[in-house]
Image: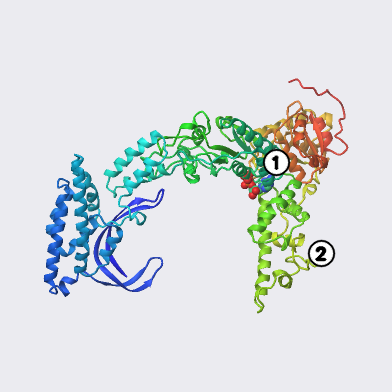
């Protein structure tokens, strides 16, 4: 329990890539711990000073013997120093120090300078008595003298008289006093030599090897305290660690791949089919040049997890690189090493993490790349993804080319709209639409529930979630295209049940019976404990009375709270001037209400709900068309005039005002909504619509039909009006969804209005036949 008190003089180093610090301290004295006062956050102890007092207390004692010892020590020290190259200033200084310093300080100083292991250094520091210290250091001096003699002999025979090499090491140590080296390296005096060996034996490219050897040469000449020392070392360590030539062996068997994909994911047939095609081509052609797959779809539809499955089928490592919000190209390509805190980009870092040069990299959220003053990360990604260029990808930090051509890149995005065009050009987009309710139920029961049970340590014998409950969660507690919120809700249910099960087990353990089959007893406690409304009454189950805990609607309400979404559609459509549109968002399709009202005024149109320019134009188009067709449909303003805007202001509102909305597809909805307002008739409550309009009343096709239809289906709507030219998109929609819905294919606004109002929207006088002149 002996330590050395010291004064920290300087701390240099960095935290990256791993903490590496050099501490420069001046030793003061030895001390002994008398009593440890506290250990955290740092140890505090009562100590007693042990040395440097000797000269006062027992200065006279055994002076003679010591004198002899110290004389002998001094002799060896001088001999050793003189064997070094005196032309090196530090050696000359050491020589002078030998004379000027008090003799009793010499053992400590010399031990820190000469070649000794950390163990030996510690032994000297532990030795309190001066006599003991002298005795222990002398053999070390002798050992080094012998070593040097041998070295000089071999040098001479090699006609190599460069003594400086011999001097370099002592030189470095002198300049640092008593530096404690990294523990791990203690047996190996010179980790730089080890590093060099590693570099030479690594399989890096020729160019990289050249750079590394140059750097290691510089490193050898550099004092450890220089900040650049740590930087260069980190750089070299990274170079050694990179998987230049290390790869996993692909095991690609299409039949097995199909099974893995099918086992991991329910539904998403189109995506799985395309992925299999891609893998089959890979198997036949055995090279990677080809488009990069990009999965585009709402969150939580399994894009990332398909990526993971692909890696699994290929037997490759998987690494996910999140690109959301990345706005600096050095995030991709690394910083130049001249910067403080410079580091490699995410690609190189990822390779280091996985340790092989042919992993599957999932570039997550490529649509969320941002631009900033620090350059455009998308441009850097181009180089990474381009098969023509990426075999010599040069990270700024590495500054040598690294071959990325073996890496399999897969990208994911929520929308293609914000992916930079050049990047999009290199990718093959595969749309992953949202799931239908039936698909969600299957996914929940095949994948999500078993996963959540395992996560919470539950078994199917303890909890049972029937299909109707799952449907309840899907319709009343979540409104999403994917299954992520559903997964979270299931997690919440499992947590609540886990508490009940654990409580039951706890109570059961209390009575002095030893472990009883957890079954029945536990159940008793659960029910005793569970108030009827908390976890539902499970008495009517055919299985043993209380277990499994059945999750029914009562339990659902208790655990998840009151339902968040109700089918309020029909309530909102109970007055004229409201219609339901279908919108596409990166998060999937959604139903959207459009509301209109009129008031006395000067013919102004007010639009609210954070609309984009395209949407505002749609509103103007809709009004113009209605004004020009007012007579035909007998639409009048409040005072009965066919000039709809005469003394009338119109206000159009798109609820969910906090969300920006844009796009042309609300055209038909606005027309319907205004037609309802001016005719005073109600729009059917189960109709939703989408379509772009022209000034002449034609309905043009729009995108995202599948997502929109699914949203309408989720919301319980029955009739959907879509543009005629979107008919082909209906093929993608699952048959059971199509069965539930009636589709009206509209080529012009007349057809839209006829379908939107019960009994059609009567045309009073046929003024003209609608024909496209475009
Ligand atoms: P994304 O990357 O599309 O946002 P994830 O891949 O993270 O979504 O998927 C979220 C969760 O949903 C994952 O746990 C995944 O296993 C699950 N999941 C999504 N789709 C399916 C599916 N078709 N079959 C099984 N599990 C699925």
Q: Going by the picture, which residue comes out furthest to the bottom?
A: 512
Q: Going by the picture, which residue comes out furthest to the top?
A: 773
As drawn, 699 above or below 529: above
Q: CA distance from mark 1 to mark 2?
A: 36 Å
Depth check, mark 1 against mark 2: the one in front is 2
- Residue at position x 21%, y 68% in the image: 132
- In the rendered image, residue 150, in percent from the top left (x then y), is placed at 20, 49
Q: Earlier in the sequence, mark 1 or mark 2?
A: 1
The mark found on residue 268 in the picture is 1
- In the rendered image, residue 373, in percent from the top left (x then y), is placed at 45, 37
- Ligand 1 is within 8 Å of the C-beta of the residue at disc 1: yes
In this view, the residue in front, 715 or 178, is 178
Q: Is residue 393 left or right of residue 1?
A: right
User: Which quadrant is home to the C terminus?
Assistant: top right
* SS at circle 2: loop
Q: Quadrant of residue 530?
A: bottom right
Q: Is residue 555 left or right of residue 370?
A: right
* SS at circle 1: loop
- Residue at position x 17%, y 54% in the image: 80
In this view, the residue in front, 382 or 264, is 264
User: Which quadrant is home to the N terminus?
Assistant: bottom left
């Amino acid at each position: 329990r002996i330590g050395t008190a010291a004064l920290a003089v300087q701390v240099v180093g960095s935290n990256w890539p791993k903490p590496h610090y050099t501490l420069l301290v001046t030793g003061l004295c030895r001390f002994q711990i008398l009593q440890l006062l506290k250990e955290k956050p740092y140890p505090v102890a009562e100590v007693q000073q042990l040395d440097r007092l000797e000269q006062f207390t027992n200065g006279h004692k055994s002076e003679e013997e010591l004198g002899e010892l110290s004389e002998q020590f001094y002799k060896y020290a001088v001999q050793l120093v003189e064997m070094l190259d005196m032309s090196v200033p530090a050696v000359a200084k050491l020589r002078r120090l030998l004379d000027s310093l008090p003799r009793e300080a010499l053992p400590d100083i010399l031990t820190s300078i000469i070649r000794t292991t950390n163990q030996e250094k510690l032994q000297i520091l532990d030795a309190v008595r001066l006599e003991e210290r002298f005795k222990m250091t002398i053999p070390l001096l002798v050992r080094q003298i012998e070593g040097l003699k041998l070295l000089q002999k071999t040098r001479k025979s090699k006609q190599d008289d460069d003594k400086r090499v011999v001097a370099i090491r002592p030189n470095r140590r002198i300049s640092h006093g008593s530096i404690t080296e990294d523990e791990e390296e203690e047996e190996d005096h010179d980790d730089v030599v080890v590093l060099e060996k590693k570099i030479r034996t690594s399989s890096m490219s020729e160019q990289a090897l050249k750079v590394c050897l140059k750097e290691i040469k510089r490193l050898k000449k550099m004092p450890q305290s220089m900040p650049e020392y740590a930087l260069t070392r980190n750089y070299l360590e990274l170079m050694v660690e990179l998987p230049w030539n290390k790869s996993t062996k692909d095991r690609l068997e299409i039949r097995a791949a199909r099974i893995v994909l099918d086992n991991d994911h329910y539904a998403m047939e189109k995506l799985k089919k395309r992925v299999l095609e891609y893998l089959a081509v890979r198997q036949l052609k055995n090279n990677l040049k080809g488009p990069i797959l990009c999965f585009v779809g709402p969150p939580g539809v399994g894009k990332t997890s398909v990526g993971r499955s692909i890696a699994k089928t290929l037997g490759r490592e998987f690494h996910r690189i999140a690109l959301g919000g990345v706005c600096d190209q050095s995030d991709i390509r690394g910083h130049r090493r001249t910067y403080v805190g410079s580091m490699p980009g995410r690609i190189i870092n990822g390779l280091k993490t996985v340790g092989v040069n042919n992993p599957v990299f999932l570039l997550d959220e490529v649509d969320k790349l941002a631009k900033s003053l620090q350059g455009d990360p998308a441009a850097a990604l181009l180089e990474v993804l381009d098969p023509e260029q990426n075999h010599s990808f040069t990270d700024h930090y590495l500054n040598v080319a690294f071959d990325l051509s073996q890496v399999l890149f897969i990208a994911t995005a929520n929308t293609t709209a914000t992916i930079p065009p050049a990047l999009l050009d290199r990718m093959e987009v595969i749309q992953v639409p949202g799931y239908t309710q039936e698909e969600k139920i299957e996914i929940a029961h095949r994948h999500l529930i078993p996963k959540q049970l395992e996560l919470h340590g539950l078994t199917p014998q303890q909890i049972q979630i029937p299909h109707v409950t799952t449907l309840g969660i899907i319709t009343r507690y979540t409104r999403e295209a994917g299954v992520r919120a559903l997964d979270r809700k299931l997690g919440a249910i499992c947590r609540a049940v886990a508490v009940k099960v654990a409580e039951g087990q706890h109570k059961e353990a209390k009575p002095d019976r030893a472990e009883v089959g957890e079954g029945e007893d536990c159940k008793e406690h659960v029910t005793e404990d569970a108030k009827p409304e908390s976890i539902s009454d499970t008495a009517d189950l055919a299985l043993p009375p209380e277990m499994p805990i059945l999750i029914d609607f009562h339990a659902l309400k208790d655990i998840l709270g009151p339902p968040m979404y109700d089918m309020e559609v029909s309530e909102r459509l109970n007055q004229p001037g409201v219609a339901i549109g279908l919108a596409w968002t990166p998060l999937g399709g959604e139903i959207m209400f459009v509301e209109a009202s009129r008031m006395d005024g000067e013919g102004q149109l007010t639009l609210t709900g954070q609309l984009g320019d395209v949407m505002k134009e749609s509103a103007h188009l809709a009004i113009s068309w209605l004004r020009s067709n007012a007579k035909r449909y007998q639409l009048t303003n409040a005072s009965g005039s066919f000039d709809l805007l005469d003394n009338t202001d119109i206000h159009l509102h798109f609820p969910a005002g906090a969300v920006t909305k844009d796009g042309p597809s609300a055209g038909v909805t606005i027309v319907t909504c205004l037609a309802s307002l001016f005719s005073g008739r109600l729009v059917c409550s189960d109709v939703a619509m989408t379509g772009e309009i022209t000034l002449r009343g034609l309905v043009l096709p729009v995108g995202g039909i599948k997502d929109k239809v699914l949203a309408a289906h989720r919301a319980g709507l029955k009739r959907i009006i879509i543009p005629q030219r979107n008919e082909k998109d209906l093929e993608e929609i699952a048959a059971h969804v199509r069965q539930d819905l009636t589709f009206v294919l509209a080529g012009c606004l007349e057809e839209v209005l006829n379908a939107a109002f019960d009994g059609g929207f009567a045309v009073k006088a046929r003024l003209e036949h609608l024909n496209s002149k475009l």
